[in-house]
Amino acid sequence: MLIDCETCTARGAGCADCALTALFTPPVEVEVLDRDELWAVEILTRAGFEVEVLEPHDEPVSPTLPLLPRTPRARRAS
């Protein structure tokens, strides 16, 4: 079967409901991933893991550790 979008009678208004659009348009979650992240998702999926891409956060997700007061170090004489 050959499907040619150039000769499609429903082109334009019908593209949103087309099966080809669903097949070739990546999900929104995938658009935010870089090449290495896509590769990791593919490897994990092939290994049998169920991979779910989470939405990105506006702020960085890094644990904040409480700062301890600096204690003076003893100096050694040579």
Image (spheres, rainbow, N blue to C red):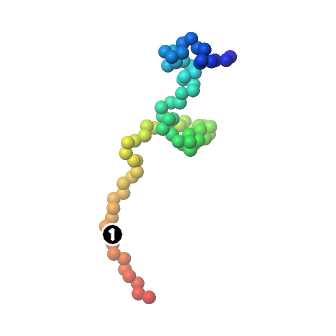
Closer to the camera in the image, 35 or 48: 35
Q: Residue furthest right?
A: 1
Residue lying at the far left in this picture: please name it. 69
Q: Quadrant of the C terminus?
A: bottom left
Count all numbered tags in the image, as a single digit. Answer: 1
Q: Secondary structure at mark 1?
A: loop
Q: Amino acid at mark 1?
A: Arg
**Picture quadrant of residue 19:** top right
Measured as percent of width and height from the top left, residue 45 is found at 59, 37
Furthest residue to the front?
6
Q: Nearer the viewer, residue 5 or 23?
A: 5
- Residue 8 spot, x, y in % from top left: 58, 14
Residue at horizontal 56%, vertical 42%?
Answer: 35
User: Which residue is denoted by mark 1 in the rendering?
Assistant: 70
Residue density around tag 1, few if under 14, some if 14–19, many if 20 or more, within 10 Å: few
Can residue 15 be spotted in the picture?
A: yes
Seen as rendered, the residue at the extreme top is 9
Is 10 drawn above or below residue 73 in the view shown? above
Front in this rendered view, residue 40 or 46: 40
Q: Residue at x 33, y 62 (%)?
A: 67
- Residue shown at the point (50%, 35%) measured from the top left: 31
- Can residue 17 be seen here? The reply is no
Depicted 61 relative to depicted 28: above or below: below
Q: Which quarter shows the N terminus?
A: top right
Q: Position of residue 15 (x, y in %)?
A: 52, 18
Find residue 65 and report its horizontal and vertical position in percent.
36, 57
